[in-house]
Amino acid sequence: AQRVTQPEKLLSVFKGAPVELKCNYSYSGSPELFWYVQYSRQRLQLLLRHISRESIKGFTADLNKGETSFHLKKPFAQEEDSAMYYCALSPQSGYALNFGKGTSLLVTP
Amino acid sequence: NAGVMQNPRHLVRRRGQEARLRCSPMKGHSHVYWYRQLPEEGLKFMVYLQKENIIDESGMPKERFSAEFPKEGPSILRIQQVVRGDSAAYFCASSPLQGREQYFGPGTRLTVT
């Protein structure tokens, strides 16, 4: 069975501080992992996916198969990073996304 | 490109009524996905459609729920005889090809009274 766990419902950090949003997953095969973000009053949008190995808006995420984790990190948080972040999993070359419950990130000045 | 459109944005139905949710994919996208988000939960996959075909409905409840994506017009998610437990946000996404990035609509918030 697929499962995506985001243990923190709310994460509050100060501007300029490092931030790490945790994501753990369970899946028997080789999954694709994604991070989606939803800014206030905007629609859900893809932030990054593990196969592209990109850094988007200063965020990175590394797939750790040993720990079955895909944590999202940014060294210096900005106020505009405040949003809801969802970790998602899909079967390799698949399509059905399975989302975690999300973490609300609040970056305060 | 206006993006994925969903309407209505908010829908209120009494128990036993029918709910129809519409999704117009992005221009050039022929793959549509429906997701449901219950309160305090993550989005859960319901169904994947291409034009005139249901590809995967493994996430759809067995009864009362149906989906279609006709040759012309939007994709429709239909819920018959709604119950309080159907109250949720329903999101539609589209992609140009299977396995490519899914672009999400703003969602329809269904409230069953």
Image (tube, coloured by chain):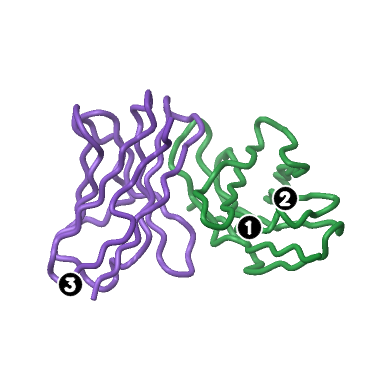
| Mark 2 vs mark 3: in front | 3
Q: Amino acid at mark 3?
A: Arg
Mark number displayed over residue A72: 2
Compare residues B103 and A39 and report the one nearer the observer: A39
Mark number displayed over residue B14: 3
Residue in view at x 77 percent, y 50 percent: A73
Q: Colour in which chain A is shown?
A: green
Q: Residues within 10 Å of mark 1 (few under 14, many from 20)?
A: some
Mark 3 chain: B
Q: What distance separates the C-alpha of mark 2 from that of mark 3?
A: 41 Å
Q: What distance separates the C-alpha of mark 3 from that of mark 1?
A: 33 Å
**Could you tell me which quadrant the C terminus of chain A lies in?**
bottom right
Q: Which residue is mark 1?
A: A83
* A100 displayed left or right of A15: left
- Determine the image quadrant of residue B84: bottom left
* B48 displayed left or right of A15: left
- Determine the image quadrant of residue B18: bottom left
Compare residues A89 and A41 and report the one nearer the observer: A41
* Chain identifier for the purple-coloured part of the image: B
Tag 3–tag 1 contact (CB < 8 Å): no
| Secondary-structure class at tag 1 | strand
Q: Residues within 10 Å of mark 2 (few under 14, many from 20)?
A: many
Mark 2 chain: A
